[in-house]
Amino acid sequence: MNLIIPLKYRPHVFKLLFLLTLLVFFSCGCDSGGGGDDADTIPPTVTINQPTDAAAYTTSSPSITISGTASDNEGIDQIRWESGTGSTGEVSGTASWQAQIDLSPGINQITVTATDAAGNSGSDVLTVTLTGVTYSLGGTITAASNTAIDSDVNDPKADYTPNDSAEQAQTLPTPVTLGGYVNQPQTGEDGRSFVQGDVNDVFRADLLADERIVLNIAAPILDADLDLYLYDAASLELIDSAIARFARTESLAAPDAGTYLIQVINDRGASNYTLTIGQAQNGQSRSSLCLSHNFVPGEVIVKSIESQPIGAGAANALTAPGMRQIAGGPGRAQLFAISAHIVGDQTIQAQSADMSSQSPLLPGASMDARTRDKLDTLYSIKSLRSRSDIADACPN
């Protein structure tokens, strides 16, 4: 059908068609552009794949390296990571990333977040447990070849072999340094020997002439008193003794090369000790009360405390246990003769070369009459040195 428009209306029709065309054009342009109604809302995808692609990881290293990838339909704008210890970092414009993370002991949560240009974000989380650092130590600990230990110490967990007699004597190499312990009953620390005591340790050793035996006492001098004796191993003849009162060290020397028994005696209290056998060191001297010293048996020189001069009354007190004054006077040293043999605080009348049952010596020990008299003199002096009114007592 043909539409005939009169000439006078044609300009108005053309204007109307032009306006309709513009209206259609702009309407189609707005609908097809998609700028406002179809905005990007898809978040990026983040993946942690090193050191593991699992959600949890355990390590003993205080610092680890993690890495991974990130992807988005419009591209990645930024990747950021952070952990509970405060470790943070970020990179821009990348699809792969790597981060160094410091850890704290226990559980650490690491979060990696990627953001795209539209502001969308996506995350991945890795939980890392930092365990304590452990090490393995292996080896062998051995004592030096010239060391030993008393075989009947107080420790109930230690190996135990009695060494209380000549028959039980513990054999020692030489030279040697031995650690030991002796105690009177009901003294010292709780342990194997607390109740019945361990007053006596006996050792066997092959010694050279003049080889030195040194006893070092650990306990304070007022708490314990240890003495040292030396015997011929074959005959049990007493060779020497060191029995000083209030001494931290006792020492003897072998007169000749041979096999000897060494006896450590506890006279009072409880104490650890070290027994050293070897060549004498420079400046090392023997004990003050040694049987082998040259002195007059049966005589003792006594000096009183200055505030308590030995007069008639004090002299009588000394003669009561078997001592007789033979020289000296008040205010100076006095010489006494011992009319009975004294062991500790007890008087013993010894009539033969065999010692009394009250003696601290080994059963079966023997000595000649002169040695016996000298030993009893030393016992007397040791007893006098424990008295509060005596400043000093020594052999003549």
Image (cartoon, grey):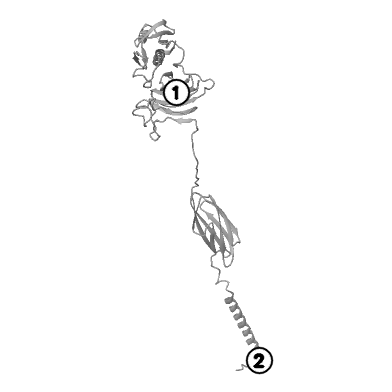
List x then y, in percent, for residue 348. Answer: 34, 14
Asked if residue 218 can be seen in this view, the reply is: no
Rendered residue at 54%/61% (across/down): 47
What residue does disc 1 label? Answer: 260
Q: Residue furthest bottom?
A: 1
Image quadrant where residue 42 sits: bottom right
Name the disc covering residue 7, or none: 2
Q: Quadrant of the N terminus?
A: bottom right
Which image quadrant is residue 393 in?
top left
Task: Classify residue 24 as left or right of residue 108.
Answer: right
10 Å crowding of disc 2: few (<14), some (14-19), many (20+)? few
291 with respect to 9 (left or right): left
In x, y percent, where is residue 179? 45, 29
| Residue 201 seen anywhere in this rendered image of the structure | yes
The residue lying furthest to the front in this view is 234
Q: Are marks 2 and 1 in contact (CB under 8 Å)?
A: no
Measured from the top left, where is residue 131 in percent x and y?
Answer: 48, 49
Q: CA distance from mark 2 to mark 1?
A: 157 Å
Nearer-N-terminus badge (2/1): 2
**Which amino acid, mark 1?**
Tyr
Compared with 57, 191 (above or below) is above
Q: Tag 1: Cα neighbours inside 10 Å, few (<14), some, or many (≥20)?
A: many
SS at circle 2: helix
Question: 47 or 242, which is in the foreground?
Answer: 242
Which image quarter holds the C terminus?
top left
